[in-house]
């Protein structure tokens, strides 16, 4: 027998915005999140990509915490969870509360050689979950 599952809130952050509403509004207007970048840390030639606004992220995150304490991915996830929780009266500490978040890359930025700015454990997915919780 399957238990019922209810979705009470959601949030997305991507190249089009920092909330599900902002993203859907941009999509309805036909906007694209794909832009040309010239970032030598990513590519040696100009490249069209979809990337979360790196200047807006610390500004948005600083409303809830110190961006310097978290990796880019951790900031994105914590901010998204925070924004989703604002839409509910949910107590996230309850045992029957489940968060589902996804990442295609994890803390991949920490794979760079000698990047120990957050310690070597932060690359592991279990540590990512621990930091976010």
Image (tube, rainbow, N blue to C red):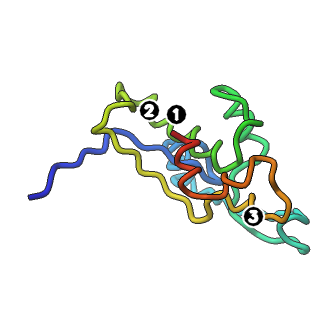
Q: Residue at x 91, y 73 (%)?
A: 44
Q: Earlier in the sequence, mark 1 or mark 3?
A: 1
Mark 3 to mark 2: distance in Å? 31 Å
Instruction: State the SS at label 3.
Output: helix
According to the image, label 3 marks what residue? Answer: 111
Residue 23 x %, y %: 55, 48
Q: How many marks?
A: 3
Q: Earlier in the sequence, mark 3 or mark 2?
A: 2
Residue 51 x %, y %: 70, 58
Q: Which numbered disc covers residue 85?
A: 2
Q: Residue at x 69, y 62 (%)?
A: 108
Q: Measured along the vertical axis of the image, is residue 126 above or below residue 8? A: below
Q: Quadrant of residue 63?
A: top right
Tell me whether the residue at label 2 lies in contact with that at label 1, contact meaning CB atoms closer than 8 angstroms. yes
Residue 102 x %, y %: 50, 57
According to the image, label 1 marks what residue? Answer: 82
Mark 1 to mark 3: distance in Å? 27 Å
Residue 21 x %, y %: 49, 42
Few, some or many residues within 10 Å of mark 3 (<14, 14–19, 20+): few
Instruction: State the SS at label 1.
Output: helix
């Amino acid at each position: 027998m399957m238990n019922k599952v209810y979705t009470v809130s959601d949030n997305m952050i991507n190249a089009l915005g920092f909330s599900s509403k902002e993203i859907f509004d941009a999509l309805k207007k036909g906007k694209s999140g794909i832009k040309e970048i010239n970032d030598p840390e990513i590519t040696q030639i100009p490249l069209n990509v979809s990337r979360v606004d790196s200047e807006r992220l610390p500004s948005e995150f600083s409303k809830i915490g110190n961006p310097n304490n978290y990796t880019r991915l951790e900031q994105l996830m914590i901010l998204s969870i925070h924004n989703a929780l604002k839409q509910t009266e949910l107590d996230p500490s309850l045992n029957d509360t489940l968060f589902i978040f996804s990442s295609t890359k994890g803390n991949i930025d920490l794979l760079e050689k000698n990047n120990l700015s957050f310690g070597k454990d932060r690359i592991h997915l279990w540590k990512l979950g621990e930091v976010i919780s």
